[in-house]
Amino acid sequence: MRILSWVYLCLAYAFVLLPVVVLVVFSFQDGRLPVPPFQGFSLQWYEKILSDTGLMTALWHSALVAFVSSAVALVLGFLAAHALARVRLPGSVVLRGVLIAPMTVSYLIIALGLLTLFNQTGIKLSLWTAGIGHVVINLPLCFAMAYAAMGDHQKTAERAARDLGASEAQVLWLISAPMLAPALAAAFFLSVTFSWDEFIIAFLLTRFDVTLPVEIWSMLRSGLSPATNAVGSLVFLVSITAVVMAEVFVFRRAK
Amino acid sequence: MTASVSIQSVTQSYGAAIALNDVSLDIAAGEFVVLLGPSGCGKTTLLNLIGGFAEPVAGRILIGGRDMAGVGPAQRPTTTVFQDYALFPHMTLAQNVGFGLRMRGMGRDQRRAKAEEILDLVGLPAKSDRRPHELSGGQRQRVALARALAVAPDVLLLDEPLGALDLKLRRAMQDELKAIQRRVGTTFVHVTHDQEEAMAIADRIVVMNAGKIADLGPPREVYLHPKSLFSAAFMGEINQIPVQNGQSPFGPVIGTTGTLLIRPEAIGLSGTLPLGPCRIIDAAFFGTHLRAHVAPLAAPDLCLTVHLPPTSTVTDGEVLTLAATDFVFLEA
């Protein structure tokens, strides 16, 4: 039985991780095709993509969109969470529900909805519009994580700060946000990963300046190449870093 | 640095529940007043109203003669020491204590000097760079006190500040609190449900019950001459003897119809109010006194609690002739 459970564990991990491992391994392929057999170790594809200005521009765009949209989503989510946790409003349950709702809607639907809206209002597609799309998908996440972290502990500290003469803005900035810092940081880094490798919204809501996943998509159309594996590995590396950062903050909070 | 507080016909309700019912109270500048009562009596509600965390539905609150209607906690000349301390965990002690001064625009160096001075006052010297989680409960309580005192409030509000401390520490902190109040001269309004704590620190005790003031006065007055059955019982153990037209179960006493109140320690072998011969039901040694239950022979159903001197020896069933030295009669 013991052996069986180990086998099961290995199979489960293999199922989850094998595609990523294959992707990373064949990004070092010394040959023209990212398929077995492995013909030797080479960094030529990394060299190629790192010197490709189109790809590097897309990478910079992705990073920009990820950080700015996550920051906006975090600020909005935190403010909404703080208000709903502190003030009793009529229909606050409904308000909470509506804030979380975008989580249940597929990215395609959100993208189509925004695309229609931008077309109607005459807003030109750009990195900004993709960023707005990413705020829409990440706001519910940031809101939910900030809301879950708010407790009575902060509430009395906020009361004390107000009692000592702090304005509402000072309470938020000097007391609430620092006390929730671990949860807010975790929400931020998770948002960054979601935005960083998001494709559908970025694909439909950008035009001339595109993000990295969209650039990879156009690379794939001209056929398989270890270069796409190399880019994919790079994307994966950034994502994993952000997730690890989020984990570090969540665990530090748990202690 | 100090100001009077005047509470004028204040009523507060939450929905249908009335938390305070037409309460009036005048607190002198520099006075140490304790609001005493069981949970739900309205004492914390009253404290919150003084601090500006809520507005009364009726009545006025004046601090230093100034009407506080519509003035928020930040603008009031009051600060609060909260029951759970409410320290800022991400700040050092100096930053915690200096927070109110920072909000008032004082510079960093001045703030730090002032914070260290106040931490010194509350008995926490040379700890200004620690963080709250490194401290014990009693030390956190001191920081909370220092933080509230740092801005030199006219009135300091204390919401069961010693409630979370163990008994020994609580008694030690009471003495210190009293000493600090004498030193700074600020008006202290302190909420507690512990009558011993109230007697230990108060200039004046305000006993509250069901949204009303049941009694008020100096500790001695409230304890020895309670003006209501509630405050008599809340301040400590007391014998309540029903009296009908001057007749008690054990014989004629003064008064008309009402309740005769006698503290257990006021009963002894001699006194001005004879209780007649009483049979000892049981007795237990308490160190400072011998606590006994007795029944007057004239009224065997009446059980009185008596504190006899610790040196006395009694046996169950023994008959002693007892009398009360001090008593209060409350008319029904």
Image: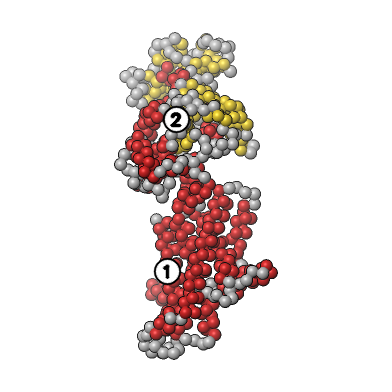
Image position of A111 with respect to B298: above or below: below
Residue at image position (50%, 68%) is A64
> Which residue occupies the extreme right position in the image?
A120
Q: Quadrant of residue B140?
A: top left
Viewer-nearest residue: B328 or A183: A183
Give x and y (percent) for residue A149. 49, 54
Task: State if disc 2 and disc 1 touch (CB < 8 Å).
Answer: no
* Picture quarter with the C terminus of chain A: bottom left
Can the viewer see residue A144? no
> Which residue occupies the extreme left position in the image?
B126
> The residue under label 2 is which amino acid type?
Met
Give x and y (percent) for residue B53. 54, 38
* Picture quarter with the N terminus of chain A: bottom left
Instruction: Tell me the element at label 1.
Output: helix
- Neighbourhood count class around disc 2 (C-alpha, 10 Å): few under 14, some 14–19, many 20 upward: some
Image position of B98 with respect to A187: above or below: above
Give x and y (percent) for residue B172. 35, 32
> The residue under label 1 is which amino acid type?
Thr
Which residue matches tag 1?
A241
Q: CA distance from mark 1 to mark 2?
A: 55 Å
Residue at image position (42%, 16%) is B267
Instruction: Tell me the element at label 2.
Output: loop
Image position of B70 with respect to B300: above or below: below
Residue at image position (46%, 81%) is A52
Can the viewer see residue A99? yes
Could you tell me which chain the residue with mark 1 belongs to? A
Could you tell me which chain the residue with mark 2 belongs to? B
Which residue matches tag 2?
B1
- Neighbourhood count class around disc 1 (C-alpha, 10 Å): few under 14, some 14–19, many 20 upward: few
